[in-house]
Amino acid sequence: MDHPTKSAPSESLAQYLSKVPAEPRKLVKSEVDFIPQSRKKWDEILVNRTTDRERAENAINDCYRYVGLEPSRILWTENPLTAMTILANRPDLVDVGEKILNQICESCHQEIDDLISPEFIGVVKAYANPRAQIIGEEQSIVFDPLGDFLNQVSMSEIKKSNPQIDPASLPAAMQDYRIAYLSYFDYFHQIGLNIPQIQPLIDLAMSCGCCWAFENITILTPKPSAIEFTDRGELRALVYDGVNILD
């Protein structure tokens, strides 16, 4: 006598649909209308000179945990020049900043690229970034080569003013990650895409100056009290405690 074949338990419709990749969608009008508000937020972050040490320390600890590392000891230095002088004498430090940035940002890119149509991604990249200028009918994007850096701190200018520091020997500060990308990711985070992992980098941008991340230590600086540019947009002064460290 034949027995009916036992069938495997069937998935619910919700379980099935959760596995079906969604087609990239367009932004709705309310989301497009929100772009100027997000840009304004980053304009304010760029000019804010307030350092929040507790927020910065919590943020960098969250960054370490995201990539599976234990939070490290945190050292605050008075300005980026002091930090780079320390780094020039510590070639033994193992950099993890690039790992943190890559893992966080690549996961955000994946989520956005899967869900949003490419033409709308381009719009957000251009218009949510406070340091982008839209040129001509083809909407070419031109980025401010100095102001584009987080908190407008230009490591290259500091190195030029202090030739005793060997640029090749120093790891990059995490704050060298461009405002263009943080403002881009933050916009999608604010409209509801599931990328909470970007929040610690946003918190760093809002609460401190520079950040170097290593296996056993993190070096942070406060924000400068003032920044001055020439008429040509070149960095002229980076002021800490009343002293221009570029002099």
Image (tube, grey):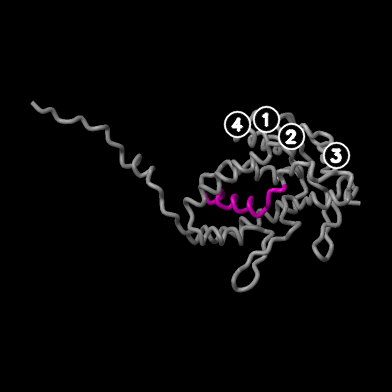
Q: Which stretch is magenta?
A: 176-192
Measured as percent of width and height from the top left, residue 14 is found at 34, 41
User: Dot 1: few (<14), some (14–19), or many (≥20) neighbours within 10 Å?
Assistant: many
Marks 4 and 2, how far apart at CA? 16 Å
Q: What element carries label 1?
A: loop
The reply to whether the C-beta atoms of the residues labelled 1 and 2 are less than 8 Å apart is yes
Residue hosting label 1? 71
Query: Disc 3 on helix, strand or loop?
Result: helix
Q: Separation of disc 1 and disc 4 at Cα?
A: 9 Å
Q: Nearer the viewer, residue 226 or 215?
A: 215
Amino acid beneath label 3: Thr
Q: Which mark is residue 167?
A: none
> Which numbered disc, 1 or 2, marks the residue that appears first in the sequence?
1
Label 2 crowd bin: few (<14), some (14–19), many (20+), radius 10 Å: many
- Does the magenta-highlighted stretch encompass residue 48? no
On the image, which quarter does residue 143 sit in?
bottom right
Camera-nearest label, 2 or 3: 3
Residue at the far front: name it: 168
Going 71% across and 38% down the picture, which residue do you hit? 56
Q: Mark 4 points at which residue?
A: 68
As displayed, is residue 190 above or below residue 26? above
- Figure check: 129 above or below 56: below
Q: Nearer the viewer, mark 1 or mark 4?
A: 4
Q: Considering only order in the chain, which callout, 3 or 2, is on the residue closer to the N terminus? A: 3
Which mark identifies residue 218? 2
Q: Is residue 77 left or right of residue 45?
A: right
Total tally of numbered discs in the picture: 4
Mark 3 = which residue?
Answer: 85
